[in-house]
Structure formats: C-alpha cells, structure tokens
Image (tube, helix red, strand yellow):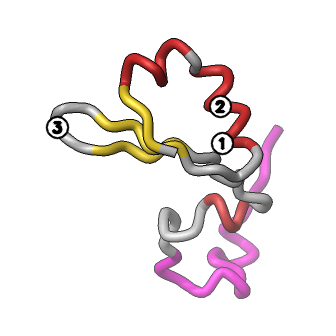
Amino acid sequence: MIINTRTFLRGFTTFKARARKGEIVRVQDKEGEFLFTIAAPRRSLLGAAKGKIVFHDDLTKPTLPKESWRPSL
C-alpha cells in the first residue's frame, strides 16, 4: 500500500493496525519513500546484545586467584 504523508498522519492508528498484521505501508513524500512495518522484539537477552558485547578473555575460568577475591558486605 502506497500513501502520502498527510494520509499517513491522519490515519496513523489504521496503518499501525495494518503493520501489526504484517502489511508493509509505504509512505511517499517529496524526498523519498519510507516503509512502515512492525519490528519483532528480540526474545532473549543474548539476542538483544548480539554484536554489542565483546568478550576479550575466557570467562569460563576464574579471573582472579582465590586469595585475591575477598567479598565484603
């Protein structure tokens, strides 16, 4: 579906409902075309952090010797 910006703003709730159902709404203006669609949320913390967290060491082994680790409350 291709619409203009004015129509999109007037019927935003309608187009949001269509996007939720999986339809892609194309909004055209003078400078180009924009796609309005639903983005599926990431389901896991690891999936959300993918590409943003970098490990520089092996975290499966202790990082401090036992005598250096002194927890305090």
Provide residue 31's location: percent of width, then percent of height: 17, 37
Task: Residue lying at the far left in this picture: please name it.
Answer: 31
Q: 54 above or below 27?
A: below
Quarter containing the C terminus: top right
Q: Furthest residue to the top?
A: 10
For numbered disc 1, what is the local secondary structure? helix
Q: Which mark is residue 37?
A: none
**Whole-Å distance between the Cαs marked 1 and 3?**
22 Å
What segment is highlighted magenta in the picture? 55-73
Which of the labelled discs sits on residue 19, or is there none? 1
Q: Decide: marks 2, 3 in contact (CB < 8 A)? A: no
Query: What residue sits 63% from the left and 77% below the top?
Result: 63
Q: Are marks 1 and 2 in contact (CB under 8 Å)?
A: yes
- Quote the CA–CA distance across marks 2 and 3: 22 Å
Residue 56 on the magenta segment: yes
Type of residue at label 2? Lys
Q: Which residue is mark 3?
A: 31
Query: Of label 2 and label 3, which has the lower sequence position?
Result: 2
Q: Amino acid at mark 1?
A: Ala
**Label placed on residue 16:** 2
Of residue 65 and residue 36, the one placed in the foreground of this image is 36
State the SS at label 2. Answer: helix
Residue 71 magenta-drawn? yes
Q: Residue 49: give x, y in percent of width and height.
A: 60, 61
